[in-house]
Image (cartoon, coloured by chain):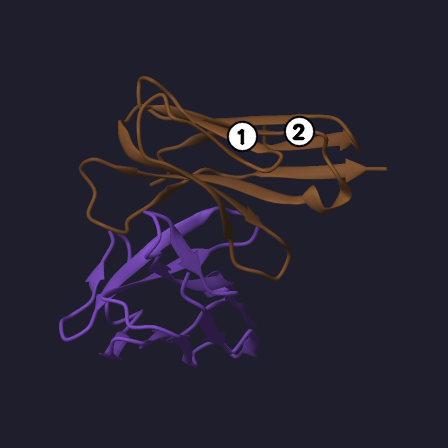
Chain colours: A purple, B brown
Amino acid sequence: SAVISQKPSRDICQRGTSLTIQCQVDSQVTMMFWYRQQPGQSLTLIATANQGSEATYESGFVIDKFPISRPNLTFSTLTVSNMSPEDSSIYLCSVPQTSNYGYTFGSGTRLTVV
Amino acid sequence: GQQLNQSPQSMFIQEGEDVSMNCTSSSIFNTWLWYKQDPGEGPVLLIALYKAGELTSNGRLTAQFGITRKDSFLNISASIPSDVGIYFCAGRRTTDSWGKLQFGAGTQVVVTP
């Protein structure tokens, strides 16, 4: 399975600022996915990021709030813009596993907005 | 929104006991996945299921893809302290694009010596 390096692992940010989260994969992958996990909750897909095209956002998530970059097949960033305390969550990137139809997740970025 | 109903929400068990949890949905899924998440980590895939009726084991873990394609269960036999964590079911519906997973709310497992 692919190995994902995600950073930062955690951050405390002031409301109104933005944070960019990076996801580096040790192999080339066509699709990368960004999930949000609110405190004590399950995971919700934010968007799918394909290299060379605009990210596809799920209902309830918009590009202005969560811009995504996918400059190559091993890297992606998610920015959480104009943050409010409601954005406090764990943000995770994920890629398909080559050996089966499962998905590998990064260790997550724990974001606290104060 | 969340499509999967996962139960129980939490379990407090003694070491050596078996654990059972399940997920149900009103939608048909073509893939069922079971993940474990430890504190401060991302979910780690335990078992993947692809066919209705499929029964798959991974060590002390056994999972089944329900025959109706709307449910799945996970069993952990002879629990040990390192089984502590949150277990999530996840599924991909036949109508969803590649990569979009629906996640259950999770089952918190606590194992006492």
Residue A22 locus on image (x, y percent): 41, 78
Return the chain for callout 1: B
Q: Amino acid at mark 1?
A: Thr
Quarter of the image for residue A48 reads bottom left
Would residue A40 appear left or right of B16 to someone viewing this image?
A: left
Q: How many marks?
A: 2
Q: Which mark is residue A58?
A: none
Return the chain for callout 2: B
Q: Look at 33% across and 18% down and name the residue there.
A: B67
Q: Which of the two labelled residues, at mark 2 and mark 1, occupies the earlier sequence position?
A: 1
Whether A78 is drawn above or below B38: the answer is below
Q: Are marks 2 and 1 on the same chain?
A: yes
Residue A62 visible in the picture? no
Whether B39 is drawn above or below B76: the answer is below
Quarter of the image for residue B95 reads top left
Residue A60 locus on image (x, y percent): 28, 53
Local crowd size for mark 2, using a 10 Å CA cut-off: few (<14), some (14–19), many (≥20)? some
Local crowd size for mark 1, using a 10 Å CA cut-off: few (<14), some (14–19), many (≥20)? some
Q: Look at 44% across and 63% down and name the residue there.
A: A92
Q: Which residue is mark 2?
A: B77
Q: Amino acid at mark 2?
A: Ser
Q: Look at 23% across and 59% down and name the residue there.
A: A57
SS of the residue under disc 1:
strand
Would residue A21 appear left or right of A62 to someone viewing this image?
A: right
Q: Look at 19% across and 47% down and name the residue there.
A: B97
Q: Which residue is mark 1?
A: B62
